[in-house]
Amino acid sequence: MLKPIYDSSKGKMRVAGLVSGSGSSFRTIIEQQIQMQDKGGCPYEVVGIFSDNPKCKGLDMGREFNVSVFVNGIRAFYEKRGKKITDKQVREEYDKETIKLFGPVKPDFLAYAGYVWATTAPIVNAYIGVNAHPADLSIEKDGRRAYAGANGVRDALLGGESEVRSSLHLVTTQVDGGPILLISEPVPVDKNSGMSLEEASRFYLKPLNDMTRKLFPRVVKDIAEGAYRRDEKGLLYYGDTPIPKGVRL
């Protein structure tokens, strides 16, 4: 028996965004909500925005769209404890505080829109979460996702790929390791461009980020409507179609 990731019979899915930059990906989720409401209704409702950076520009959306804003400076949090930013035990404490901050708005779903990816079990277990990654996570080498991690675009170029894609996946405690939901259309790679690796990485990151901004609201809507489902083994389906490596556009 297939069960939806989110049970739409509970009502509108309550969505919160985790942002650390401009928040442009999360903005598209809010804008889609407004557009759908104007046309008769939206299956989700944006209820909060959180950032680990007090200077995050994306927090301005709270005032613009009348959405609750929550901030907890992550660097100050670590400095107070005298620990490095890579300390997972402190990160677990930090994620527990994030859950407490979200208490008043009671989200069902978190959109990791440009957020730090190293999340821990408390927050992963508390909420459904989706992250965007600027590489094709379905490509595997030696039994592992070849382009997971902080340098997905660069690694794909180093790997000799003739095209690059972005992926949206469910969040787990494993970096970029969750089940894949959606993979973007391809961006062809010009191997004779003459660009350095760093120049090419920046060049291809832009169109991949642009695709992410289009696909994120689509995934949120589909999850809210119950389109993504799981079987008793946890394998993903889109409707009745199995998607072991996500929906590929």
Image (cartoon, rainbow, N blue to C red):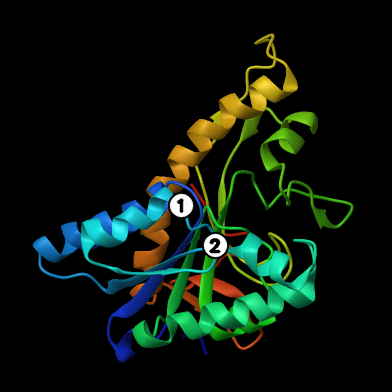
Q: Position of residue 179 (x, y in %)?
A: 63, 67
Instruction: Decide which of 75, 189 is in the foreground and name it.
Output: 75
Q: Residue at x 66, y 28 (%)?
A: 201
Residue 142 vs 220, above or below: the answer is: above
Q: Position of residue 19 (x, y in %)?
A: 48, 58
Residue 237 vs 112, above or below: the answer is: below
Disc 1, SS: loop
Q: Is residue 30 left or right of residue 7?
A: left
Residue at the disc numbered 2: 52
Tell me which corner region of the image, top left, top right, bottom left or bottom right, holds residue 78: bottom right
Q: Residue at x 75, y 73 (%)?
A: 81
Furthest-right residue in this view: 142
Tell me which corner region of the image, top left, top right, bottom left or bottom right, holds residue 16: bottom left
Q: Position of residue 105 (x, y in %)?
A: 35, 82
Q: Is residue 80 left or right of residue 100?
A: right
Kindly check if marks 1 and 2 are in contact, taking CB atoms under 8 A apart as contact: yes
Q: Report the amino acid beneath label 1.
A: Cys
